[in-house]
Amino acid sequence: MAGNDRVWPGIRDWRPQQGGGSESETQPPLDLMDDFDINFADFPPVPDSQPQFPPVTLDQVLRGPSRQYLKKLVPEPDEDPEKKEIWFKLHKEITHTITKIMQADFDGSRNWGTVEDDKKDRWFKAFAQKFNWDYEITQLVRENFDAVGVKRLNDCIHYLKTKWLKGKRSKS
């Protein structure tokens, strides 16, 4: 075999001969698979889905361990940076976090009203894993979360629509 002095016995050299050839230099030819006799019935069946774990409730997230190490949401935060207290209108990190959560699970909804309630709840649970707050103000936190969600979703849709219209005009 040209170009290869060391070929193990019984192994076919699949590289093309010098001067090229139709085979890929990185992949063996398709007829090489003919040498294998694979019976897929011998393999165990693959389950249709992964094992399902019971969904975690918001209450379980809010009462979970180690939440004291997360930044704490407080309606009137202390100015002391060591306390790590923040609130929605005063801190961009909250807005960025909500935006990332929504983008990771976005399905093309045109506005907040068309987003399914289950999805909003899932986004809020993800948010609850990033920040800590007193259990008693959960409803206030949710209202502020929803307000930021409405604004961010509208901003994202506006940005995408503007970008789409700009691209459409440049092609005309």
Image: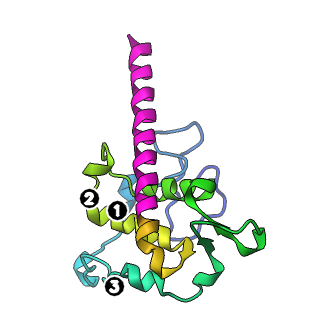
Distance from label 2 to label 3 (Cα)? Answer: 22 Å
Residue at (51%, 74%) from the top-left corner?
129
Task: Name the foreground residue: 57 vs 29.
Answer: 57
Q: Is residue 113 above or below residue 9?
A: above
Q: Say which quadrant the N terminus sits in.
A: bottom right
Distance from label 1 to label 3 (Cα)? Answer: 20 Å
Q: Bounds of the magenta span?
A: 143-172
Q: Which residue position is annotated with label 1? A: 120
- The image shows residue 69 at horizontal and vertical percentages of 65, 80
Residue found farthest to the front: 76
Q: Earlier in the sequence, mark 1 or mark 3?
A: 3
1 or 3: mark nearer the eye = 1
Residue at (42%, 66%) from the top-left corner?
142
Local SS, label 3? loop
Q: Residues within 10 Å of mark 3 (few under 14, many from 20)?
A: few
Q: Which residue position is annotated with label 3? A: 53
